[in-house]
Amino acid sequence: MQNDLKHIQELLESSNPDETREGAYMAMQGGAVEAVPQLVKRIEFSNPGVQEAVEAALRKIGGQPVLFAVLPLLRPEDPALRNISMDLLRAVGKCDVETLTELLKDDAPAIRIFGADS
């Protein structure tokens, strides 16, 4: 598994969209929680196929690691990034409702709205 994880991480770091997408699918199939930080970084990849693969992998892996990795993506001004983040939070948020409830206390009105929507 260690070799698989290393290979997944190498693919996710690639600038080649096909390789990055392959890494995301491998992470999804293997439930590679260790790859969550790299997957989250790749959400911003400009290739829609990569974004789709990364989002699918994060949904499948799920749980608190995904929830905590996605929360910071609510703050940037990029609406597309926030929308993907919101979709992911809706999918995995049930694993930690308390953390989502904390968003309702945020100073930023938009974050409170996102918390209520999740």
Image: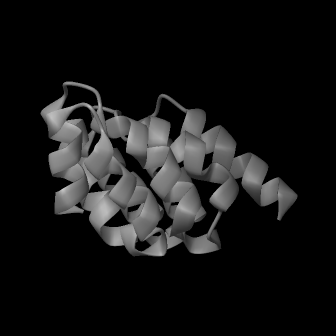
At a point 76% along the width and 59% down the height, the residue shown is 4
Q: Quadrant of the C terminus?
A: bottom left
* Residue 40 to residue 13: above or below: below
Q: Is residue 98 left or right of residue 52?
A: right
Q: Is residue 77 left or right of residue 33?
A: left
Q: Residue 74, percent across and down?
A: 29, 39
Instruction: Identify the coloring.
Output: one colour
Q: Residue 8, percent across and down?
A: 65, 51
* Residue 99 to residue 9: above or below: below
Marker count (numbered): 0
Name the residue nearer the viewer: 44 or 108. 108
Q: Is residue 73 left or right of residue 63?
A: left
> From this viewpoint, which residue is outermost toward the right?
2
Name the residue nearer the viewer: 104 or 6. 104
Q: Is residue 107 visible?
A: yes
At a point 29% along the width and 31% down the height, the residue shown is 75
Q: Residue 15, percent across and down?
A: 48, 28
At a point 58% along the width and 57% down the height, the residue shown is 65
At a point 34% along the width and 33% down the height, the residue shown is 44
Q: Quadrant of the N terminus?
A: bottom right
Q: Residue 108, percent across and down?
A: 22, 31
Q: Is residue 49 visible?
A: no
Occupied quadrant, residue 31: bottom right
> From this viewpoint, which residue is outermost toward the top?
77
